[in-house]
Amino acid sequence: MIINSRNRRLRTTPALRALVQETVLTTNDFVMPIFVMEGSQKQEPISAMPGIFRRSIDLTVQECRELFSLGIKGVNLYMKVSEDLKDNTGKEAWNKNGLMQNTIKAIKDAVPEMVIMPDVALDPYSMYGHDGIINNGKIDNDATNEALVKMSVSLAEAGADIMAPSDMMDGRVAAIRQGLEENGFTDVGILSYAAKYASSFYGPFRTALDSAPKENQDIPKDKKTYQMDFHNSREALDEVLKDVAEGADIIMIKPGIPYLDIVSKVRDMIDLPIAVYNVSGEYAMLKAAAQNGWLDNDKAIIESLTCIKRAGADMIFTYAAKEAAILLNS
């Protein structure tokens, strides 16, 4: 039997496979999410996310130096805010001497070339654990946008490079863009969480920041009135196009691996850079399987991140960034 076309011919050796490889994963693809807490010389492990910690500012700066030396060019910042600073306005989010602002300044002083992408959302600062201000038992979209603008301007003043609004309020990209422009921050970008789903994969993250919605019969019990329904895909495309029109520089899709169909559809539709968030639940599942001997940890990390890039991601927010960088560098 003569077979004219044999795909296996190009798989016969490692060198040949490398020559025809379509997707190449590098450290330039990674953004490392970082959790920051008050104090000095403090580090607390996050039980559901092995290898991930909450750190005080000084240890966060030390970590950023190491990340940059490994080739990781961007960090995504989240704050563990003291309970006494939380309210229904989120005003601590634009405190010029707040934890986020001081963290940004410290990182920029130590690693000036690191791209700092702070999370822009009110849930760490909310007494209710929601991403928005609550009025009459509902999330007030427009009042929240006003707060997000104040927060973005404050973070830009501290030295942040790219705002990363993760709240999913309607119209917030346009509002933030206008606020940044009016205050002279024309070079500060916006990475919009355009298609962020109300997902069950966020559990470990919310534990890390104590940012889950609080039990209260007078407020929404979850985030489904503003985050997307996971049954929908056409809605995601609509959300993306609206954020592009409002002035987003980069589009985020979140979560990652369970939503690669969305990533692929968006990649076919827009030319802007696409970020994908390989979220805490995805990371925790891989780590749990590896710890039980069901997966090879190193191989699974590289394969999963490569698949996200293959689907169309230009950058990947992942808790495995440091680990993956070490593997790739070796």
Image (tube, grey):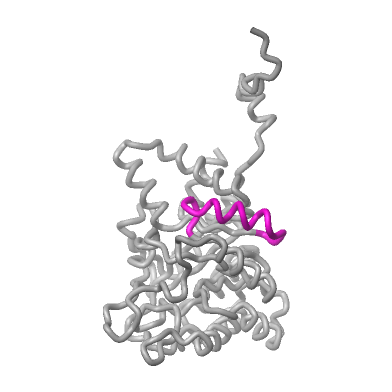
Is residue 70 left or right of 5 when viewed as pictured? left
- Left or right side of 315 for 82: left
Can you give x and y, in whole percent of width and height, for residue 220 in the image?
Answer: 35, 80
Q: Which of 114 and 118 is in front in this view?
A: 118
**Residue 12 higher or lower than 152, as above or below:** above
- 46 lies above or below 80: above
Is residue 199 rendered to the left or right of residue 194?
left
Q: Does the magenta stretch include residue 32?
A: no
Give coordinates of residue 35: x percent, y percent.
Answer: 43, 66
- Looking at this view, name the residue that lies furthest to the bottom: 136
Percent of width and height locating residue 103: 50, 73
* Magenta-tinted stretch: 255-273
For the point 46% across and 75% down, the residue is: 226
Taking the spot 59% from the left edge, 61% from the top edge, the residue there is 74
Q: Is residue 162 left or right of residue 300?
A: right
Q: Is the magenta stretch mostly helix, strand or loop?
A: helix
Q: Is residue 58 above or below residue 17?
A: below
- Which quarter of the rendering shows the N terminus? top right
